[in-house]
Image (cartoon, rainbow, N blue to C red):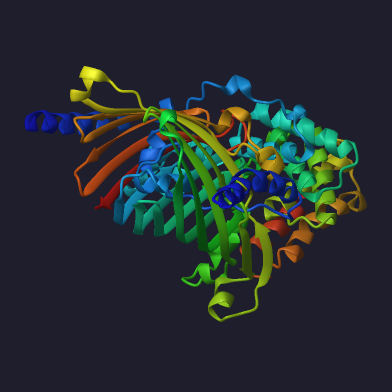
Amino acid sequence: MRKRPVGLLLFVCFLLPVLHAGAESTASFSESGIEILSARDAAFGGPHVALADGLSCLFTNPAGFRSAEPELSLSELTVNLTGPVFSIADIVVQALSGTSATDLITTESVQNLLKKLYASGSLFGPIAFGYVGEGLGFGFFNTSSVTLTSTGTVPKLMAGIQEDVVFAGGYSFRIPLPEALQSTFDLGILLKAFLRGNMTIEKSTLDLISVLSSISPDLLLEEPFTLGVGVGADAGLLWNWNSLISLGIVGRNLWTPTLYSSYATLQSFLDAGTPTTTLGLVPIDLSAGLLFTPSLGFLERYVTDIKIALDYDDILDFLTHPATASNPVLHVGLGIELTLLEILNLRGGFYRGYFSGGFGVDFTYVRLNVAMFGTELSTEPGLRPAYNLRLGLEFRL
Amino acid sequence: MEKMKRFLCFFTVTGAVLFLAGCEAVFTFCPVTFLQRPASSLTAEQQLEYAQDALASGDAATMESAYAALKALLDAGSTDSSTQYTASQLAMELSGAPAALMDALTALASGSAADLDISALDTIDTTLLIEAAQYLQDAKENGADLTATDYALGGLGLLLEAADGDIDNIATLTTEEIETATDFVLQGIEDLDLAADDPLTTILEQFSDLLQYL
């Protein structure tokens, strides 16, 4: 009798993503999914689907809810800065020290920066309430972000502001296996919903002359505003052998429809104007990963724990969103984490073509995580690299 | 043990600060760049994505290969406005015209308009700028939104087209021959819905006048 739900879940995990992949390639446009910023994952070579380790598995693999140590998140503040943060800081210092805007903008270094600028700042939290453990996982989060890009010799500037609110909840259960196999096998499913507000302002340098001539506090009110809602499901499996090797497979956004309402201006939204609505579908992300947690023998007195993880994410991107399908090497994530004396974590990795590194300090109820890593903004390695600095402060019980 | 833990924390924070001071180059170094797929091996929609990334990268060699790929698509009969517009932006950037315009804007911003060096036009690749103007016109006909910069540089490209790509021929053009270029620039005022007292209206009108007196 128990075979029926298992068969159904296996169907959801594997067959549905494959079937849906073909259908989705004909969708009118693709949407970006939910991204939960984690300083630990960033330093550790990206998210790892075979890692069932506290709240981090909420959006990486719902099958991990069963084997994860129970963890309650009260709040979190994770700040991420992307782009040439030190160069921008240098320009800000020059501006503050009295250099005129004209002199500043005509310097070669600033003009070179504006030719290919990508800078963003994101804040995950303070709403980050969630629980994972004993097969249950749920959470309520918010993320705010600001992005600034500039392209071309006569720069075309784009500024974006976005706010995401996400609610997710799911359950994982264990499939009993013969003891002789020394294995555990968990299946999990997660349902999620999100609300997204977005404003994007795009101007060429000449257009800015027009904007700046009539600048007022109402400037933002005159820019287009988009409000999006989406619901979806993730499903995954996690197999562990002898607490040494784990294999995880997850299908994210198995069916995640979205409804975007575009308002001509923010004022129109505030005045309850009539929007243009667009239906979309977040592309499926099928990912797989391996985790190796070897025993270190006598070294365990100092190195409490070691984790080595290897993942390949978004396996079906060439079917689900072919236009933006990445080079295969950009799907690979490799990471290592060493826990020293139970409180200090050192992390390193290689993710999407770039190295990452960082550390974490566990003060029991508060955790500090720092990560430095590169990301690729294009679909090919080395074409548009961006530097990232991420700092996270997690309040956990 | 407690001392050891304190030492570790101190070591970590100090190490992190030192690390942060000079690590941008390390983390933006990509050791697998050699695995890049050539633009010609991508599908049409991937080529468009690649071209937009190439434009954003600011790298001339990448932009050249992306432009060649898009040009082949358009020569094969593609009428996609996004492809036409992106091709125009790449051609414009590769022609060197935006650099000349930026020099002019910088000169105007610093109040040295009198020193504006028209001979900077000699450095422009006229063939590419003419192609950019043609793609801009096609993209506009197919529904793409152009910026004020596009109208200005597109007008210059159309002027060079009328002069058969030779800057020296511009002076010999008749008013009728110049009209296509000036009309394109002035069309920007209407398309961008600019008010008469908008400074951008003045700039485009002056640029249109400038084309007549080059």
**Residue at 74% of width from left, 57% of height from top?**
B145
> Residue B171: x and y, percent?
84, 41
Residue in front for this viewpoint, A292 or A187: A187
Q: Single out the residue that lies furthest toward the front.
A: A1
Q: Is residue A125 above or below residue B158?
A: below
Total tally of numbered discs in the picture = 0
Horizontally, residue B32 falls left or right of residue B94, namely left
Q: Is residue A75 above or below residue A55?
A: below
**Residue at 45% of width from left, 49% of height from top?**
A173
Horizontally, residue A362 falls left or right of residue A109, namely left
Residue in front for this viewpoint, A208 or A233: A233
**Residue at 18% of width from left, 24% of height from top?**
A301
Residue in front for this viewpoint, A366 or B23: A366
**Residue at 72% of width from left, 53% of height from top?**
B207
> Residue B136: x and y, percent?
79, 48
Q: Is residue A99 visible?
A: no
Q: Is residue B190 visible?
A: yes
> Residue A266: x and y, percent?
55, 71
Q: Is residue B137 above or below residue A218?
A: above
Q: Quadrant of residue A182?
A: top left
Residue in front for this viewpoint, A213 or A47: A47
Q: Is residue A263 above or below residue B125?
A: below
> Residue B201: x and y, percent?
68, 63
